[in-house]
Image (cartoon, rainbow, N blue to C red):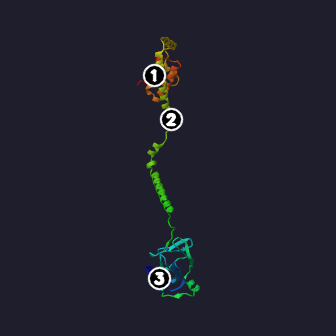
Amino acid sequence: MKFLLILLVSVFSSIELKENFYQEVSEGYEVYREVVNYENPYYEISIIQGINNDEVTFGLYFYNHKPSSDPHRVIIFTGEKEYRLKTNSRKDIYAPAIKLEKDVKIIIYDSFGRERGTSYYIDAMNAEDFKILYDDYLIGDNMGLNLSSLSRNLPSLTLQGLLLIIFGGIIVILGLVILFLFITKKGMFSEKKKAENIFNFREFAQTLFEQAQKEEIRLRENEFEERFNEQIDEEPKQIYERQRIYDDVDETVDVTKILKDKGFNVDYPSLSEAEKNEIMLELMLLRDLKDITLEQYQQEVIKLWSK
């Protein structure tokens, strides 16, 4: 009983709306003709075309029979552009006067996006051509009707499309921020920041060289300490033998002059730590080659590192 009541209300509503549509067309148009008057279990559609305010327009009435379970929609095509009309809560259309400058193709889609029924075509023309081409038109009251507004039909936004828009927006914003920092020389593009991030190879190489020198000095000092301890433990005869060997070295040797002849700067107080380390290596070499005595080596080391 409830279903029957709903059906009757729907039918009477459709009849009343359709009558109002044709009544408004009759009052507003100068002349008009019916292009389509069709109904099926899903929807009802009527299309008229005529002269309204001295130009050819068309009117469209569309009524959904199943607005809750399977609402249908109407898309109007002009070339590659798609348009849709304003609908009510039931997705019905009531548009007595529509104006487009090009030929029109009307397609009806169900709730799943599938085409339903026949596509309808309306040719664009002027008022004079309309009266020449058609002689089956009806006479109206020529009161004039305001044009119904059309809006562009844009593709439905999917989840993937939404994510692309979001990520694209983020990329654009980041790009603008980086461009602003680059133009204003701020942030990572500031001169101070760039100077901090420049890799100084010369300083890096100097640091490695100084570390190698310090390690070499440490190893040689350890070696010297080991040899010194061995000398303490040796027999007196061995000590005297070693002393005899050093006695053969000229104790009047000027170690500073030797270093100077080898190209070293012997102005010790003005030397850097790296330059002093180079002289230390040379002194160790002279000592090991027995070119200078241990005492001469030690004396020169004291002079080298004295402040």
- Image coordinates of residue 211 in percent, x first then y, are 48, 31
Extreme right residue here?
133
- Image coordinates of residue 93 in percent, x first then y, are 48, 77
On screen, 260 above or below 31? Answer: above
- Give the CA separation, mark 2 to mark 1: 26 Å
Task: Name the quarter where the C terminus is drawn.
Answer: top left
Q: Secondary structure at mark 3?
A: helix
The image quarter in which residue 132 lies: bottom right
In primary-sequence order, the first of circles 1 and 3 is 3
Q: Secondary structure at mark 1?
A: helix
In primary-sequence order, the first of circles 2 and 1 is 2
Type of amino acid at the residue the image marks with label 3: Val
Q: Which mark is residue 293?
A: none
- Image coordinates of residue 1 in percent, x first then y, are 44, 81
- Give the CA separation, mark 1 to mark 3: 117 Å
Q: Nearer the viewer, mark 2 or mark 3?
A: 3
Label 2 sits on residue: 205
Label 1 sits on residue: 301
Residue 116 visible in the shown view? yes
Q: Residue at x 49, y 36 (%)?
A: 204
In primary-sequence order, the first of circles 2 and 3 is 3
Label 3 sits on residue: 11
Q: Nearer the viewer, mark 1 or mark 3?
A: 3
Q: Nearer the viewer, residue 232 or 99?
A: 232
Extreme left residue here?
307
On screen, 229 above or below 142? Answer: above
- Image coordinates of residue 291 in percent, x first then y, are 52, 18
On screen, 140 above or below 209? Answer: below
For label 1, count other residues whose C-alpha is less than 10 Å away and answer few (under 14), some (14-19) or many (20+). Answer: some
- Give the CA separation, mark 2 to mark 3: 93 Å
